Amino acid sequence: MASWTNEVWEDGVVQDLTLDDFLTKSGNDAVGGKRRVLEEPSLDKATLQKQRRMIKNRESAARSRERKQAYTVELESLVMHLEQENARLLREETDRKRQRFNWLMECLIPVEEKRKPRTMLRRVNSAQW
């Protein structure tokens, strides 16, 4: 019996055998011992088309996954860049607010607070005499 380890046992002797040798292995035919070709099980046209379509679908799915991965990596890179730019702009805004506050404090004229005048009670004529 042939095993798929490229070795064939014939009469107790191990022989190396290739696929071509296996397919064209001579046998004892009733018609003068001619070599016969062992054929693969014949596959009909529909089965072959189905197999081709399955292979194409797998390849298409693999390409789609690669495109999705590339798109995801691109988006992650963009997010990281935008987060860095946002942090830089927030720092810049804080610095400008601090500078403006300092500038306003330098430009202000000190103002002394005036005291409120003391409220005085007044007499009101509410009734007639």
Image (cartoon, rainbow, N blue to C red):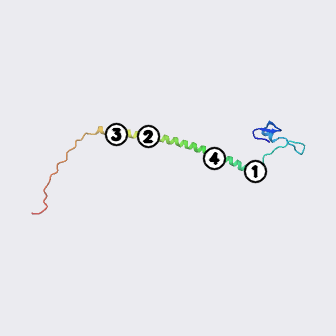
User: Which numbered disc, 3 or 2, marks the residue that appears first in the sequence?
Assistant: 2
User: Is label 4 or label 3 in front?
Assistant: 4
Furthest residue to the right? Answer: 32
Residue at the spot of label 3? 100
Secondary structure of residue under mark 3: helix
Furthest residue to the front? Answer: 12
Q: Position of residue 67 (x, y in %)?
A: 59, 44
For mark 2, does the 10 Å Cα neighbourhood hold few (<14), some (14 to 19), or many (20 or more) residues? few
The residue under the point 58% across, 45% down is 68
User: Is label 3 or label 2 in front?
Assistant: 2
Residue at the spot of label 4? 61
Type of amino acid at the residue the image marks with label 4 = Ala
Secondary structure of residue under mark 4: helix
Residue at the spot of label 2? 87
Q: In the rendered view, tell whether residue 45 sits above or below residue 19.
A: below
For mark 3, does the 10 Å Cα neighbourhood hold few (<14), some (14 to 19), or many (20 or more) residues? few
Whole-angstrom CA distance, mark 4 to mark 1, is 24 Å
Secondary structure of residue under mark 1: helix
Whole-angstrom CA distance, mark 2 to mark 4, is 39 Å
